[in-house]
Each structure stands twice: as structure tokens, then as C-alpha cells.
Image (cartoon, helix red, strand yellow):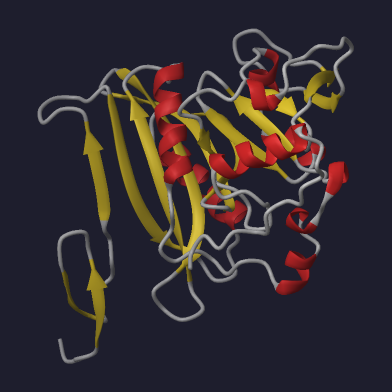
Amino acid sequence: MDDQATRAYHANDLSFDLPAALRDKTMHMFTLSDQGASEFSLVISHADTQPEEELDDFSSRLVQEMGRALPKFQLRHSKETLLDGGPAIDLAYSWRKDGIFMHQRQVIALMRGTAPDSTQAIMIAATCLASFGDGWNATFDRLLASVRLRRPLAAAGADSAANAPGTATGPTAPFIFALSERRRLLNVFADRDEACRKTDAREVEQNAWTFFDADGEALQAQFVVPNSGTLWRKAGSYLLAPPETAGATPLADCLPQGVVLQALAPALPFASIDEVRAYLLARAGGDGAALPGPPNRHG
């Protein structure tokens, strides 16, 4: 190799000067056992994006490639989510391998590549030998909530930040809390529309999520298009409204111990569960405390 150019390369256990011509195909794999098939495993990998390729384009291309490569491939869902405050896609699918069906959830996000002005896709995939139950779904969701990317894409510009919910005060702040007590996860969305778009209607129908307004007061899901089907249920749509009967428990009184704050969009105002609790306590006291400003997650 004639090219002597190198770049500093950092791994978990070492760093070294990597010849610039070599392509990084790093993969991290985690399993429950050293031998035989693992009930649950985790693989983290990354791939280069094509020029001008956006997240949705990459996700669609990946699904098409898996559909061609994996026998009996079936896509269960594809929905928007967040990873370390940035947009991501959550895929769930299954395929047949050695006579049994494998089940996988994979979350995909874009981050800055190693070359200037380039992007890479990071892919975090969890695989189960059986269908994902509540336990493994909760384990994977908690792991995703803890992810912090080393090379996140640039945050929104100053103009967007100036109009972010973090600058709002008083009860007119539009953001929405979504709590899954079973998974011990708390999401914060910019408004009701985003909460409804990004929280699966089938899970809402099964009472897997409860919603609260910016004051921590309960909201009720009202379905305008019902979930349909029996074996493979098609998601409907719903709106959020105040409950029809009084006395619903406010968010401050139903946050479970060990709850994890899901990764948030950079413009949203909370960086930790402690900040959420302090904010709700101030709201309950009626002192009209301002929201904290957008946190610096990568500084």
C-alpha cells in the first residue's frame, strides 16, 4: 500500500493509526451465552450512506435488501422514534433460519461519518429466538434510551432553538408526556400530534402508554380510526383529549421507581428524570416556574 496517510482510530481497548485506505467494518456483538444459540443477542454495526441519502431512504433500502436476502422475511412494523435526541427508525421483522423463525428489532439513525461532510448509518439490532415479549422489549428500550452517539448530526440551528418549547413558560407549553409503567420509560413529545404519530396505536389500545399534558395532567386517547384485523393488526389513529371523568392520577404521582427518560429531541427541555420531577413539583405548587432550557447533551 503506497498511500501513507493515516487517521487516528479509537476502540474500547486501544487506539492506533489506521491507514486511510482501509474501510471500517466494526461490529459489536453481545450474547447471553458463550456456546449455542442465545435467547437474546445484540449487534451494533454501521454502514455508509449513499450520496444525498436521508434516513427514510436508507431504511427503505435496508428493508428491500433484507427482503431479498432473508427467507420468509416479514416486516412487522416500521415507525419513527428517537435515538440520543435525533430522528431514528424502529423496525421489527422476522425471517426463517434453519427451520425456525428469528425475530429482530433494529433501530437505525444517521450520524456524521469519518470523512468531512459525510454521514453513516448506525444500526442497533436485538434478536430473539422467540417473539419479543414485554421483558426483552423493555430491556431493548432501556438500552436505546441510554445511547449517546459520539458523532451526532448537527443540532438544529439557533433560529429553531429560539422557538423551541424550552423557551416557553406557563401552562401553554405544548409538549406531551407519554409514560409506559410496564417498560419504565417516559417519552416527551413536542405536541399532541407528534405524540400520536410516534406512539403505536395498537400499544395504546392495550394500555401500554398513558399520556399527560405539559402540567402533568392526564389525557385520554380517543380513537378516530380503530385498529383493525385479527392476526396482523393494522394500526388505527387516535387523538388526545382531557379524560371524560375527573380524578385521573397526575404524572407526578405515578412515575415508577427506576423510570428512564427516553432520548429527546435537542429542542425539548428535559435532560433527566430529576428535572422532570422538579418541574412537575413546581407546577403542582402553582408557582409557574419556567422550563429548563434545551440541555447540552454532547458538550
* x 60%, y 69%: residue: 52
Whether residue 293 is visible, yes or no, is yes
Q: x%, y% of residue 264?
A: 60, 48
Q: Position of residue 176 (x, y in %)?
A: 75, 37
At a point 75% along the width and 29% down the height, the residue shown is: 212
Please tell me whether residue 132 is drawn above or below residue 269 in the rendered image. above
Q: Is residue 185 above or below residue 173?
A: above
290, above or below 183, in the image: below
Q: Determine which quarter of the picture holds residue 24.
A: bottom left
Is residue 197 shown to the viewer in this render? no
Residue 221 placement, left or right of 30: right
Q: Which is more toward the observer, 290 or 204?
A: 290
Does 48 sit left or right of 268 as displayed? left
Q: Is residue 7 left or right of residue 240?
A: left
Q: Quadrant of the N terminus?
A: bottom left
Toward which corner of the image does residue 102 lie, by quadrant? top left
Question: Which percent across, then down, holds residue 131?
Answer: 41, 18
Residue 175: x and y in percent read: 77, 42
Q: Quadrant of residue 244?
A: top right
As displayed, is residue 116 above or below residue 136?
below
User: Residue 235 or 13: which is nearer the viewer?
Assistant: 13
Q: How many marks?
A: 0
Q: Residue at x 45, y 28 (%)?
A: 258
